[in-house]
Image (tube, helix red, strand yellow):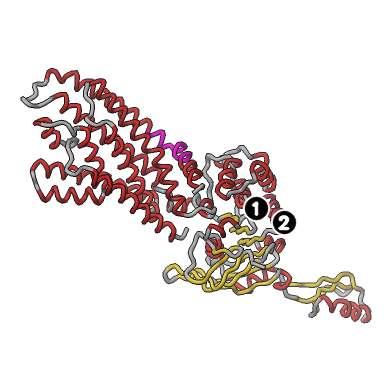
Amino acid sequence: MSAIPIIVGYGLREALRRKVFAVVLLLTAGFLFLYWLANHYLFRDLRHIGAPNGIDARGFAGATMFGLAMFATLFLGVVLAVFLTLGAVRGDAERGLLQPLVVRPVDRPTLLFARWLGAVAVCTPYVAAVYAAAMVITGVTGRWWPDHLVVPALELAAGVALLAALSLLGSVFLTATANGIAIFMVFGAGLVAGLLGTIGHGLNSQTLKHAAVVAAYIVPFEALYQDALHEITASTTGLTGFLLELGPFGGAFIHGSGVRLWALAYVVAVGAVAALAFSRRDL
Amino acid sequence: MTAALSARGLEKRYGSTVALGGVDLEVGEGELVGLLGPNGAGKSTLVKIACGLVRPTRGEAQICGARAGSRDAKRRLGYLAELFRFPGWYSADELLVLHQRLAGSAGGVTERAELLELVGLSAASDRRVEQMSKGMQQRLGLAQALVGSPPLLLLDEPTSALDPVGRRTVRLLLEELRRRGTSVLLNSHLLSEIELVCDRVVILLRGTVVTEGSPAELSRPRGIEIETDDGTTVHDGRREDVPRLVAELVAAGRQVYGVRVLTSTLEDTYLEAVGGETS
């Protein structure tokens, strides 16, 4: 077990040295600036918008904007997680970086777990920081705050950690490029399934809802994202709450502790399969 | 006495391709064994199985009595891969620190300084890997393999990127390791290098051992060359036949200026064993 902090440190150092980290930081700064600008104009113009009766315009605008910020946060977090892990096994082995580490008295599952921890140690604080920054921007600019502050951040971070685990699993079998493409396709498929679920919810289509629920369990980062969206407006009721549930960044068709437990079990299962496959892989 | 490396009936198949077809090999304590063979003969596969990077299809390999690939086995070996790379942002010293920690070596700064000196990189301890030439990186790789003073060293083409001076450094290093009693399995294409430093040579061809023995055992007599006032002639015979042949020539009235016992080189033996095969 003493090898874990050594490999985590190795991974952290690698993460900070990679250009992708600087690129993500730049993108984040750009996003937060644009997000502030959007909030500024939206809430400035809000008083001129005549909302229908029963609609809390500020709450609707705040939740929708912050939902958008959560999507961007998830996306940026996933970009970071995937680029930190996509070549961890096959990619590094092909470049000759992995062999000097694997021949040391460190079990392969330990090495893989430590690489995941290293990625998580970079990505989850990043996600939490972007989430907090976006929340403060919307809160200060529009005087709107999510109904629950902490749980959505934890769920977004968990979603990113889950995708990092999937990316590590993919890295055992695929080249870095193929793995990156595969993970982003899985990510996109999850998001599309989530949107379909939202549409199905609005149209009350049992088939679409069922398909979206199945997809959410297959790729539970999407379920966590949906649950995080649900949490920010968990106490919003009435017509505003109903309309938010119909929107792309609104409510959730699947949420609750069951999803969280499933996501945890999913990460454990993905980790176990990755560890087993890595242990059997010739390098 | 437990062998540093012991392989019994080692087989490795990749689908229908046989990389190793039942290899038995032993590297004794303090022994320096050279592994020769054409490209694709299975040398790297054998070394990779020994250090746990590749799983054998059949048979087993042990490092100092521990199953190859196990933690105990890994604690007892140092490895330099044929194709390797270190993260460019590490300095030589930092890289050795990383491997000291992974290997559980308590050698500290003293060990690192000694290793860098051994491979001629003392002046480059703070230089980043990305600023090093390929040859320097290869020497750093050797230093990395020696971290923790492992009893067995597995070197896969350790001189492939080195210039003549670098090769000499490695040869001196191998001689130093022999003095220290470290066992070495050296996979190399450089026959002269193997001939100079190895106690024993193993030649692989298509995944099987075709010849093995000490360089002296592998060299065969090719006659005796004698230079006289009548010219240079080659006679059948061995070293012990030289006095008789010289006496006969002198008795026949010839003046003998020089005598040379001819033996086959390792290159001759190698070419004979592999039949001119290159891959």
Residue A35 position by quadrant: top left
Residue picked out by circle 1: B149
What is the chain letter for disc 1?
B
- Name the spot of residue A104 as percent of width and height, x first: 54, 53
Q: Read off the magenta span.
A: A12-24
**Residue closer to the observer: A155 or A26:** A155
Residue at the location (56% across, 55% down)?
A: B81
Residues tagged 2 and 1 counted as in contact (Cβ below 8 A): yes
Kind of residue at disc 2 = Arg
* Residue A33, above or below B235: above
Question: From where the camera sits, is residue A182 visible?
Answer: no
Residue at the location (49% across, 45% down)?
A: A7
What is the chain letter for disc 2?
B
To the question of a shared chain for discs 2 and 1, the answer is yes
- Name the spot of residue B140 as percent of width and height, x first: 61, 47
Residue B154 position by quadrant: bottom right
- Predominant SS along the magenta part: helix
Q: Is residue A78 left or right of residue B67?
A: left
Element on which disc 2 rests: helix
Task: Examine the structure image and report whether residue A90 is included in the region drawn in magenta.
Answer: no
Q: Earlier in the sequence, mark 2 or mark 1?
A: 1
Kind of residue at disc 1 = Ser
Residue picked out by circle 2: B180
